[in-house]
Image: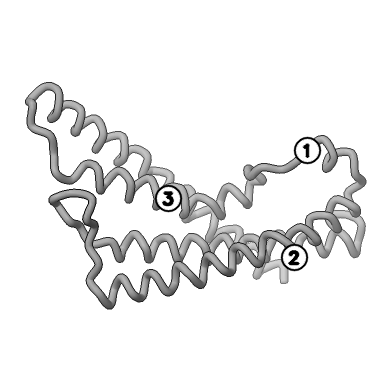
Amino acid sequence: MKSFLRAIDSICEWIGKSFSWLVLALTGVLVFEVIARYVFKDPTSFAFDLTWMFFGVYIILGAAYTHLGGGHVRIDFLYNRLPLRKRAVLEMVLYLIFFFPLILVLAISCTEFAFLSWAGDERSSASLWKPPVYPFKTAMMIGFYLLAFQGLAQFIKNLQIAIRGKE
Protein backbone atom coordinates (compact mmCIF):
# COMPACT_ATOMS: atom_id res chain seq x y z
CA MET A 1 0.00 0.00 0.00
CA LYS A 2 2.85 2.39 0.83
CA SER A 3 4.41 1.92 -2.60
CA PHE A 4 1.02 2.56 -4.27
CA LEU A 5 0.56 5.79 -2.30
CA ARG A 6 4.14 6.88 -2.98
CA ALA A 7 3.64 6.19 -6.71
CA ILE A 8 0.51 8.35 -6.85
CA ASP A 9 2.21 11.13 -4.89
CA SER A 10 5.31 10.95 -7.10
CA ILE A 11 3.35 11.00 -10.36
CA CYS A 12 1.22 13.95 -9.25
CA GLU A 13 4.25 15.82 -7.98
CA TRP A 14 6.25 15.21 -11.17
CA ILE A 15 3.37 16.23 -13.46
CA GLY A 16 2.54 19.28 -11.33
CA LYS A 17 6.12 20.51 -11.26
CA SER A 18 6.66 19.74 -14.96
CA PHE A 19 3.58 21.57 -16.16
CA SER A 20 4.17 24.51 -13.82
CA TRP A 21 6.70 25.65 -16.43
CA LEU A 22 3.76 26.41 -18.73
CA VAL A 23 3.45 29.70 -16.88
CA LEU A 24 6.64 30.80 -18.67
CA ALA A 25 5.21 29.87 -22.06
CA LEU A 26 1.99 31.67 -21.15
CA THR A 27 3.95 34.77 -20.15
CA GLY A 28 5.96 34.59 -23.38
CA VAL A 29 2.83 34.41 -25.53
CA LEU A 30 1.27 37.35 -23.68
CA VAL A 31 4.42 39.47 -23.94
CA PHE A 32 4.69 38.65 -27.65
CA GLU A 33 1.04 39.60 -28.18
CA VAL A 34 1.40 42.89 -26.31
CA ILE A 35 4.48 43.83 -28.35
CA ALA A 36 2.87 42.77 -31.63
CA ARG A 37 -0.36 44.62 -30.83
CA TYR A 38 0.90 47.87 -29.35
CA VAL A 39 4.36 48.31 -30.84
CA PHE A 40 3.87 46.88 -34.34
CA LYS A 41 0.07 47.43 -34.53
CA ASP A 42 -0.28 43.85 -35.82
CA PRO A 43 -2.05 41.58 -33.29
CA THR A 44 -1.59 37.83 -33.59
CA SER A 45 -4.31 35.36 -34.49
CA PHE A 46 -3.08 32.73 -32.03
CA ALA A 47 -2.48 34.46 -28.69
CA PHE A 48 -6.03 34.27 -27.35
CA ASP A 49 -6.37 30.53 -28.00
CA LEU A 50 -2.90 29.70 -26.71
CA THR A 51 -3.38 31.66 -23.49
CA TRP A 52 -6.63 29.98 -22.45
CA MET A 53 -5.29 26.55 -23.43
CA PHE A 54 -1.95 27.03 -21.63
CA PHE A 55 -3.64 28.45 -18.55
CA GLY A 56 -6.25 25.68 -18.48
CA VAL A 57 -3.63 22.94 -18.75
CA TYR A 58 -1.48 24.70 -16.14
CA ILE A 59 -4.41 24.79 -13.69
CA ILE A 60 -5.87 21.33 -14.24
CA LEU A 61 -2.58 19.43 -14.34
CA GLY A 62 -1.42 21.30 -11.25
CA ALA A 63 -4.57 20.58 -9.26
CA ALA A 64 -3.47 17.13 -8.05
CA TYR A 65 -0.07 18.53 -7.02
CA THR A 66 -1.80 21.34 -5.14
CA HIS A 67 -4.03 18.78 -3.45
CA LEU A 68 -0.97 16.74 -2.48
CA GLY A 69 0.54 19.79 -0.80
CA GLY A 70 -2.72 20.70 0.98
CA GLY A 71 -3.06 23.91 -1.00
CA HIS A 72 -6.81 23.79 -1.60
CA VAL A 73 -9.29 25.75 0.52
CA ARG A 74 -10.17 24.39 3.94
CA ILE A 75 -11.97 25.88 6.94
CA ASP A 76 -8.95 25.87 9.23
CA PHE A 77 -10.43 27.51 12.31
CA LEU A 78 -12.45 24.36 13.02
CA TYR A 79 -10.12 21.82 11.44
CA ASN A 80 -6.99 22.81 13.39
CA ARG A 81 -8.75 22.54 16.75
CA LEU A 82 -9.58 18.86 16.26
CA PRO A 83 -7.28 16.05 17.36
CA LEU A 84 -5.45 14.21 14.57
CA ARG A 85 -7.77 11.18 14.52
CA LYS A 86 -10.94 13.30 14.40
CA ARG A 87 -9.42 15.43 11.62
CA ALA A 88 -8.81 12.29 9.60
CA VAL A 89 -12.37 11.06 10.13
CA LEU A 90 -13.79 14.47 9.19
CA GLU A 91 -11.71 14.53 6.01
CA MET A 92 -12.85 11.02 5.08
CA VAL A 93 -16.50 11.99 5.49
CA LEU A 94 -16.01 15.13 3.40
CA TYR A 95 -14.20 13.14 0.72
CA LEU A 96 -17.10 10.70 0.51
CA ILE A 97 -19.81 13.38 0.47
CA PHE A 98 -18.23 16.08 -1.68
CA PHE A 99 -14.89 15.25 -3.27
CA PHE A 100 -15.37 11.84 -4.86
CA PRO A 101 -18.83 12.42 -6.36
CA LEU A 102 -17.80 15.76 -7.88
CA ILE A 103 -14.42 14.62 -9.20
CA LEU A 104 -15.83 11.41 -10.68
CA VAL A 105 -18.60 13.29 -12.48
CA LEU A 106 -16.06 15.77 -13.83
CA ALA A 107 -13.61 13.03 -14.87
CA ILE A 108 -16.30 11.02 -16.66
CA SER A 109 -17.72 14.12 -18.35
CA CYS A 110 -14.27 15.25 -19.48
CA THR A 111 -13.60 11.75 -20.83
CA GLU A 112 -16.74 11.96 -22.96
CA PHE A 113 -15.84 15.48 -24.10
CA ALA A 114 -12.31 14.40 -25.02
CA PHE A 115 -13.48 11.38 -27.04
CA LEU A 116 -16.11 13.43 -28.86
CA SER A 117 -13.56 16.15 -29.56
CA TRP A 118 -11.09 13.65 -31.06
CA ALA A 119 -13.83 11.95 -33.09
CA GLY A 120 -15.11 15.24 -34.50
CA ASP A 121 -11.72 16.90 -35.00
CA GLU A 122 -13.03 19.77 -32.86
CA ARG A 123 -11.48 23.17 -33.44
CA SER A 124 -11.65 26.38 -31.46
CA SER A 125 -13.97 28.97 -32.90
CA ALA A 126 -12.65 31.78 -30.70
CA SER A 127 -10.18 33.06 -33.29
CA LEU A 128 -9.27 32.86 -36.95
CA TRP A 129 -6.44 30.45 -36.13
CA LYS A 130 -8.89 27.64 -35.19
CA PRO A 131 -6.47 25.29 -33.39
CA PRO A 132 -7.56 21.77 -32.42
CA VAL A 133 -9.21 21.56 -29.01
CA TYR A 134 -8.84 17.82 -28.39
CA PRO A 135 -5.34 18.02 -26.84
CA PHE A 136 -6.68 20.54 -24.32
CA LYS A 137 -9.73 18.40 -23.53
CA THR A 138 -7.50 15.35 -23.15
CA ALA A 139 -5.33 17.27 -20.66
CA MET A 140 -8.49 18.18 -18.74
CA MET A 141 -9.50 14.52 -18.61
CA ILE A 142 -6.04 13.47 -17.39
CA GLY A 143 -6.04 16.25 -14.81
CA PHE A 144 -9.33 15.17 -13.26
CA TYR A 145 -8.23 11.52 -13.11
CA LEU A 146 -4.96 12.58 -11.47
CA LEU A 147 -6.94 14.62 -8.96
CA ALA A 148 -9.21 11.61 -8.32
CA PHE A 149 -6.21 9.35 -7.70
CA GLN A 150 -4.56 11.93 -5.45
CA GLY A 151 -7.83 12.22 -3.53
CA LEU A 152 -7.93 8.43 -3.18
CA ALA A 153 -4.35 8.46 -1.85
CA GLN A 154 -5.24 11.20 0.66
CA PHE A 155 -8.36 9.27 1.68
CA ILE A 156 -6.29 6.12 2.33
CA LYS A 157 -3.76 8.14 4.35
CA ASN A 158 -6.61 9.56 6.44
CA LEU A 159 -8.04 6.07 6.90
CA GLN A 160 -4.67 4.90 8.23
CA ILE A 161 -4.56 7.86 10.63
CA ALA A 162 -8.13 7.19 11.77
CA ILE A 163 -7.27 3.56 12.52
CA ARG A 164 -3.81 4.03 14.05
CA GLY A 165 -4.20 7.48 15.55
CA LYS A 166 -0.93 8.67 14.00
CA GLU A 167 0.55 9.36 10.58
Is disc 2 surrounded by few (<14), some (14 to 19) or many (20+) residues within 10 Å?
A: few
* Residue at 47%, 53% in the rendered image: 60
Check if mark 1's residue and mark 3's residue have beta carbons within 8 Å: no
49 lies left or right of 93:
left
For marks 3 and 2, the one nearer the N-term is 3
Q: Tell me the residue that label 3 is attached to.
A: 18
Check if mark 2's residue and mark 1's residue have beta carbons within 8 Å: no
Q: Where is residue 131 shown, x and y percent of the image?
A: 20, 57
The answer to whether residue 14 is seen in the rendering is: yes
For marks 1 and 3, the one nearer the N-term is 3
- Can you say which quadrant of the picture contains the C terminus? bottom right
Q: Where is residue 166 shown, x and y percent of the image?
A: 88, 54
**Which secondary structure lies at badge 2?**
helix
Q: Tell me the residue that label 1 is attached to.
A: 76
Name above or below for residue 56 compared with residue 123: above
Residue 96 bears which disc, if any? 2
Circle nearer the viewer, 3 or 2: 2
